[in-house]
């Protein structure tokens, strides 16, 4: 029994220009205590997928369908009241920009205490003690004094630590991290990632890590979902994805990874722009940008299906297996060659 | 904090001199003769010259200004330094001390402005917040229509319409006039109830423009704050909507409103002139308009000094208040 089972999740937004299909039939599973990486470009629907699971989209202009079974309960069909009890308690979320994700007019202590008191029947003093404990656990120096400081008195990295403390304060089973390191500088990124890793071992939470950085995924994830234009295009255990990537879009992502250990003239980039989700391309949504495009790609949307000899590894691509293996090998060799 | 206050007071003094010098020069260059006006129609040229000398108008402008400032100083040096009551001089026209004129008119204007501020905030905050929570709803559209009317219509026109329909046609309220809150002159209405009864129409007239501006501003601020990341964080924590609104949205959305309120009190004093004229309220606005018509420089200067000090004090209070409610602001 998986902790979270997402099945055919669809999130459409009504806008003045028409219906935007932000998430269009996404499915994945997440086991207890495991980490799932969701990778994709900006606008591929990674964040909206998670906001939908949390029920944080604006109800007025959102059409949602599909299921998100969390411990046998469907989060999508749940009443807002019950969902509120789960949010921040069983499922917590941290966001991309720690500079704007904390309320500027309340001390961080008050914001942590609020998170506790919303779900626990404890006194204010007990909640404060717990908040302090969490701040120490995430490595805020002199936490006793800093608990009464306001967000603007913290650096970006420290604020993200506060956000993590606030998310983990009620021991959630699932932590959704929406690009938690994107807004931070590289050294801080590494600190935050190792902190999350450490805390995951300590608290046993499962994590959904949304990112566009395959490096982050390699470091922290057990499984990876690659999203493109509101759909899942490849899904695999992290080792398999890096060893035998199957989808031209994944190749593009891998090829565009900057490397410190290689001299490359220019970074390889995926040509073109992600499509507008008001009017996505027919057939495979990646076909206008795909260097391997065939006629069938323009008419038929490839289903997500398992790779013949790897049941855990799924991809959505019309290319034949031989070509996929050959091109993946070529790509990995160039990357290794560049490194050598 | 102390250093901040000292700096603010020094600025206030500079501001005070700037305002009074400009006003004084303006009165000096307008082609009118206050002495002739004060003397009356039957005066001969000789009389006017005597009045001019009596009022000190024969002296150069810097001497007149110096005397004006000297009267205002709380310390006198003639006959050894000693404290004295700052004086605004005597009216050219009625010969009454301007201090008395201003002190009699100020409570009327204060009643009008403070009551108006309370009324406009009572109207603007709920309407602004509700229409932000339900954009494009009937309430939102109705309130935006109200905003358009409130901003477009001149207070004098609104005042006359109110006085005609509510006061005259339907007889619900007095058409004009004022009743003292305490110690009314014998034979005249007074007391809190009469006071409020006489001020209902002026308050409404006065509040409409600002209520309209504030509805629009509060609506925009709340709409903007609702999309802030920290509001999403609060929801992600599992906070119910009422708490999100109170603790996270309103607290932040109201910060700029406090600043605006402080600045608008000054503007409101200007707006009070129209309302007082329409409803014949014996406040500072009407006093200064009458004084202007009579070229009564000391009275006009008195009102200007009083208004300047009031605005400076209000702004200082608002700044201190702002630093208190917004932890990001440090007064240094």
Image: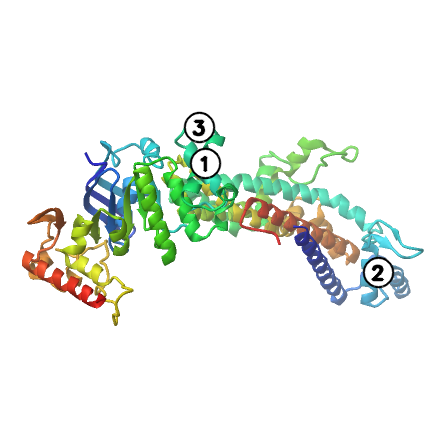
Chain holding disc 1? A
Where residue B135 sits: x, y (%)? 39, 44
Outermost top residue: A121
- Do callouts 3 and 1 mark residues in contact (Cβ within 8 Å)? no
Query: From the viewer's perspective, is residue A155 above or below residue B121?
Result: below
Q: Residue at x 89, y 57 (%)?
A: B77
In screen coordinates, is A334 left or right of B95?
left
Report, in whole angstroms, how far the alpha carbon at label 2 lies from the one at label 1. Answer: 62 Å
Tell me the residue that label 1 is attached to. A113
Chain holding disc 2? B
Tell me the residue that label 2 is attached to. B67
Where residue B281 sits: x, y (%)? 69, 44
Which quadrant of the structure image shows residue A215? bottom left
**Disc 2 or disc 3, which is closer to the eye?**
3
In screen coordinates, is B226 left or right of B54?
left
Q: Residue at x 81, y 58 (%)?
A: B68
Tell me the residue that label 3 is attached to. A122
Residue closest to the eye, A255 or A22: A255
In which quadrant is the C terminus of chain B drawn?
Answer: bottom right
Q: Tag 2's secondary structure? A: helix
């Amino acid at each position: 029994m998986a902790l979270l089972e997402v099945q055919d999740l669809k999130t459409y937004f009504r806008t003045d220009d028409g219906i935007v299909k932000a998430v269009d039939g996404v499915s994945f599973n997440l086991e207890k205590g495991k980490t799932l990486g969701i990778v994709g470009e900006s606008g591929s629907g990674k964040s909206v997928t998670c906001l939908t699971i949390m029920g944080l989209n604006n109800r007025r202009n959102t059409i949602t369908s599909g299921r998100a079974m969390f411990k046998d309960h469907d989060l999508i069909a749940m009443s807002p009241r019950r969902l509120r009890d789960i949010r921040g308690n069983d499922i917590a979320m941290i966001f991309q920009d720690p500079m704007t994700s904390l309320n500027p007019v309340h001390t961080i202590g008050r914001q942590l205490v609020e998170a506790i008191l919303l779900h626990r029947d404890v006194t204010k003093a007990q909640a404060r003690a717990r908040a302090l404990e969490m701040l120490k656990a995430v490595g805020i120096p002199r936490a006793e004094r800093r608990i009464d400081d306001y967000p603007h008195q913290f650096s970006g990295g420290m604020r993200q630590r506060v956000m993590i403390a606030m998310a983990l304060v009620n021991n959630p089973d699932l932590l959704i991290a929406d690009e938690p390191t994107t807004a931070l500088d590289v050294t801080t990124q590494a600190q935050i990632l190792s902190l999350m890793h450490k805390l995951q071992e300590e608290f046993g939470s499962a994590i959904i890590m949304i990112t566009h950085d395959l490096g982050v995924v390699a470091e922290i994830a057990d499984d990876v979902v690659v999203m493109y234009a509101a759909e899942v295009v490849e899904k695999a255990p992290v080792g398999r994805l890096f060893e035998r990537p199957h989808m031209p879009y994944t190749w593009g992502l891998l090829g565009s990874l900057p490397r410190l250990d290689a001299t490359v003239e220019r970074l390889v980039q995926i040509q073109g722009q992600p499509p507008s989700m008001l009017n996505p391309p027919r057939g495979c949504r990646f076909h206008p940008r795909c260097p391997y495009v065939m006629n069938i790609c323009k008419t038929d949307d490839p289903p997500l299906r398992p790779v013949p000899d790897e049941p855990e590894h799924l991809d959505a691509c019309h290319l034949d297996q031989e070509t996929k293996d050959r091109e993946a090998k070529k790509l990995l060799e160039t990357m290794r060659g560049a490194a050598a | 904090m102390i250093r901040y206050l000292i700096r603010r007071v020094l600025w206030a003094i500079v501001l005070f001199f700037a305002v009074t010098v400009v006003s004084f020069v303006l009165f000096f260059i307008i082609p009118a003769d206050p002495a002739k006006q004060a003397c009356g129609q039957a005066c001969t040229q000789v009389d006017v010259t005597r009045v001019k000398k009596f009022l000190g108008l024969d002296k150069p402008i810097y001497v007149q200004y110096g005397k004006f400032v000297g009267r205002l100083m709380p310390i006198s040096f003639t006959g050894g330094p000693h404290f004295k009551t700052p004086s605004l001089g005597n009216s050219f026209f009625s010969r009454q001390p301007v201090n008395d004129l201003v002190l009699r008119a100020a409570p009327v204007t204060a009643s009008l402005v403070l009551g108006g501020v309370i009324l406009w905030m009572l109207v603007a905050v709920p309407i602004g917040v509700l229409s932000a929570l339900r954009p494009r709803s009937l309430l939102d559209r109705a309130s935006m229509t109200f905003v358009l009317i409130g901003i477009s219509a001149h207070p004098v026109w609104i005042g006359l319409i109110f006085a005609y329909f509510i006061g005259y046609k339907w007889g619900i309220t007095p058409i004009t006039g004022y009743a003292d809150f305490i110690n009314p002159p014998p034979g005249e209405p007074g007391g809190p109830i009469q006071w409020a009864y006489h001020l209902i129409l002026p308050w409404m007239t006065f509040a409409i423009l600002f209520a309209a501006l504030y509805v629009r501003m509060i609506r925009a601020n709340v709409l903007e704050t609702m999309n802030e990341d920290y509001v999403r964080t609060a929801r992600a924590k599992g906070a119910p909507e009422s708490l999100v609104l109170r603790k996270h949205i309103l607290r932040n959305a109201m910060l700029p409103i406090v600043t605006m309120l402080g600045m608008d009190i000054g503007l409101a004093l200007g707006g009070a002139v129209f309302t007082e004229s329409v409803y014949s309220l014996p406040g500072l606005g009407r006093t200064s308009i009458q004084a202007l018509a009579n070229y009564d420089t000391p009275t006009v200067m008195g009102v200007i000094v009083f208004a300047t000090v009031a605005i400076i004090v209000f702004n200082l209070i608002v700044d201190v208040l702002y630093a208190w409610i917004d932890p990001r602001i440090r007064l240094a």
